[in-house]
Amino acid sequence: MTNINKKLRTISLTLACLGLFSCGQVDEYDFILSVEDQINFKAKAIIINGNNNSKYRTIYLDTLQSETYTSIYAEANQMPIHQRYNGENNIWATFHTPISYTNYDTNVNYSNVPYVASTSVRFDYARSYNGQTTGYVPTKLDLYTKQMVGPIHKSAIRKRDTIPVYMHVDFDGRYEVKDTLFIVLAPR
């Protein structure tokens, strides 16, 4: 055997031995804990409706402007630790509504403008800045997201229309939760 082959054989044998002896023992407690977390985990997500648990929410909006907006918040619980990515929850919500409107009040006609854009938004923790929590703070579950509703035309407010908002929450493709909120429009 040549000198190079002997060196390569020695290096590969050394690496193989290091690989065998450096393998640590799997902690059974961590495995059992993660299995228990997975079995006991129940995905939860809700659209927040103020202080009551009704599926109807009356929102008082200004009719001075031709179009206005409002926002709704949704909350979800955290995923088990072993299902997170670098500690981040991979939870997304998609909001949509079958209701749209056509605006004939101006020179420009808008047709089939949806009240809720069908976009996905991510759930996240409440943020803190200089030790103080800023923005929305979840009240019932751990994470929150915000969705804008609008444009809402003033004619819909005057007619006191009801907008159904459907939410579909995806917990990293493993779990799904659905919720609905009916927004009743009312003039101020």
Image (cartoon, grey):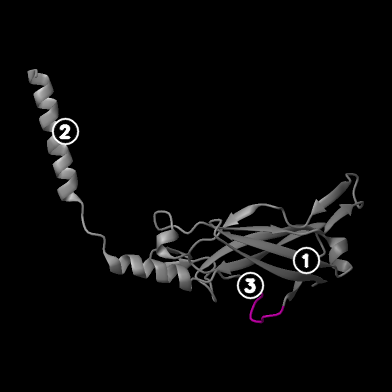
- Looking at numbered disc 1 in the image, what kind of residue is underneath it? Pro
Left or right: residue 162 versus residue 51 is right
Residue 144 position within the rendered picture, expressed as x and y whole percent measured from the top left: 55, 65
Residue extent of the magenta highlight: 49-54
> How many neighbours does mark 3 have within 10 angstroms: few (below 14), some (14-19), or many (20 or more)?
many
Q: Write down the residue under mark 1.
A: 164
Residue 16's image quarter? top left
Residue 96's image quarter? bottom right
Left or right: residue 81 versus residue 20 is right
Residue 107 position within the rendered picture, expressed as x and y whole percent measured from the top left: 91, 45
CA–CA distance in space, label 1 to label 2? 66 Å
Residue 48 badge: 3
Q: Secondary structure at mark 2?
A: helix
Judged by depth in the image, the label closer to the viewer, 1 or 2, is 2
What is the residue that sits farthest to the left in this orientation?
3
CA–CA distance in space, label 3 to label 2? 61 Å
Q: Going from the N terminus, do you reach mark 3 or mark 1 first?
A: 3
Q: Write down the residue under mark 2.
A: 12
Left or right: residue 1 versus residue 149 is left
> How many neighbours does mark 1 have within 10 angstroms: few (below 14), some (14-19), or many (20 or more)?
some
- Looking at numbered disc 3 in the image, what kind of residue is underneath it? Ile
